[in-house]
Image (cartoon, helix red, strand yellow):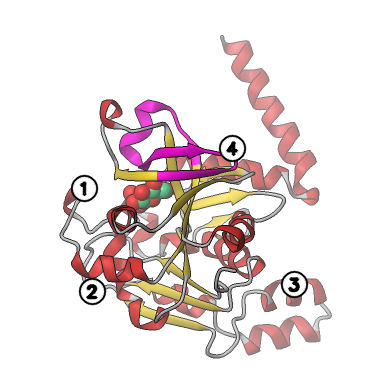
Amino acid sequence: MAKKVTKAIFPVAGLGTRFLPATKSVPKEIMTLVDRPLIQYAIDEARAAGIKEFIFVTSRGKGALEDYFDHAPVLEQELRSKGKTELLETLKNTNMDSGAIAYIRQHKALGLGHAVWCARRLIGNEPFAVILPDDVIAAEKPCLQQMVEAYNETGGNMVAAMEVHPERSSSYGMLDVDDDQGELVKIRGMVEKPKTEDAPSNLAVIGRYILSPNVLKNLNQLKSGSGGEIQLTDAIAAELTQGHDVYGYRFKGQRFDCGSKSGFLQATVSFGLARDELRDDLYAYLQDVMMIDKAAQ
Ligand code: G1P
């Protein structure tokens, strides 16, 4: 049986330039879908998958992220004294146990592979998960939990996978499929952001990974790849040349690309509609908008 996955890396060092001017003072990961920051969705997913140690790879200007996970005794006391127990519970869910969370700085923006490599000493010789908080996945069973269950059977390395339109391949790590078993896909190669004509399939990597510590060793050796950055995709592809297994996992759920404005808005609407207290109002509003739109045509 595969070794238990208890550590997760959250690469959150990006500047979030696509969301300027908001990201001038607010880390992108603190931006909210309805009323919860992006990072909270990632943390909840990790917890559901059995993660106990949370490693954030940060950069300058991400202080609000660290504050977010601190206990807020004054606020908690205020809510307690006013009997606002539900809000108090919500707030407590954001607290992390002492020692369960670590922050490490990525001093230079050298790419996702480099960000993960920065956490190598905290990972040691254990398998670990990587969650990219920009990829928000709505699912009955959280995506990483689905993957951990599959990984417990397979071992090796596993990446979340999803079919994308061929024209979108230059935005993703793309998988070269060896054996397609449906949910599970055995991989023989991976390419970071290929042109459409060079993509080995239309199966893309989505931001959830379970990786063997050997990937960190591969990152030691890597030179910069696609876009002049040190790519995690290349370090995982190196596993294959060393005879180790890599699987794609077609998760069940809906993925939102919250690294883009359109994806962020779609996620906002979708998560809004999923909330009992918001659904009716929001739905009525969306219907009105659609009607006005139709009438205008
Ligand atoms: C990163 C990875 C890419 C992956 C994508 C998923 O790219 O490098 O392989 O497909 O996340 O969202 P980024 O979107 O950070 O450029």
The label nearer to you, 1 versus 2, is 1
Disc with the residue nearer the chain's start (1 vs 2): 2
The label nearer to you, 2 versus 4, is 4
Residue wearing tag 2: 107
- Measuring 55% from the left and 75% from the top, which residue is drawn there? 6
Query: Mark 3 touching mark 1, by CB under 8 A?
Result: no
Q: Which residues are magenta?
A: 162-187
Residue wearing tag 3: 87
Relative image position of residue 198 (x, y in whole percent): 26, 30
Mark-to-mark CA distance, 2 and 4: 40 Å
Query: Mark 1 touching mark 2, by CB under 8 A?
Result: no
In the picture, the quarter occupied by the C terminus is top right
Residue wearing tag 4: 182
Name the amino acid, label 1. Ser
Q: Is residue 152 above or below residue 258?
A: below
Name the amino acid, label 2. His
Query: Mark 4 touching mark 3, by CB under 8 A?
Result: no
Residues 193 and 73: in front is: 193
The label nearer to you, 3 versus 1, is 1
